[in-house]
Amino acid sequence: MIRVLVLNGPNLDLLGRREPGVYGSATLADIESMVARRAGELGVEVSLRQSNHEGELIDALHGASGTFDAVVFNPGAYAHYAYALLDAVAAAEVPVVEVHLTNIAAREVFRRTSVIAPACVGQISGFGPRSYLLGLDAVVEHLRGSRQ
């Protein structure tokens, strides 16, 4: 069975309370429920994690190889400057899809570039909580296509 780590970075534990006009009213628990349902529909297993600490995210990416087949990763604001996370994604030895709730290309100038994106197999942003579902769909399709 395909196993996917869904990894969330800083401040995503505040979803639903933090700037709902920007990030929407769905909580992280709501998104995790949606992802778990979609995983069941796809016949894959997901593990859901969140941390506000860059080192813990790096450790999770380092530990992905051999435990998970892929990662769906919302690095939050770390996407824009955390080169150590870029290195961890590049070293992960599993495909990583970067996701964002908002369209980062349409946000403030400092948010328009992801330093992590070059090491990912793809990036999905701007679809709110559906970004996670699209990310899961994409990485599962990527894995299944590579196994044929």
Image: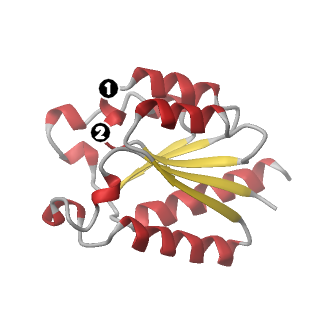
Disc number at residue 121?
none
Residue 132 in the image: x percent, y percent?
Answer: 47, 61
Disc number at residue 77?
2
Secondary structure, mark 2, is: helix
Q: Which quarter shows the N terminus?
A: bottom right
Q: Residues at badges 1 and 2 in contact (C-beta under 8 Å)?
A: yes
Residue 45 picture quarter: bottom right
Is 20 placed left or right of 144 in the picture?
left
Q: Please name the residue shown 75% across and 45% down the image.
A: 67
Secondary structure, mark 1, is: loop
Q: Label 1 amino acid?
A: Tyr
Looking at the image, is 79 positioned above or below residue 5?
Answer: above
Residue 60 in the image: x percent, y percent?
Answer: 58, 39
Residue 6 picture quarter: bottom right
Is 103 placed left or right of 110 in the picture?
right
- Crowd class of label 2 (few under 14; some 14 to 19; many from 20; radius 10 Å): some
Residue 85 in the image: x percent, y percent?
Answer: 47, 28
Residue at image mark 1: 81
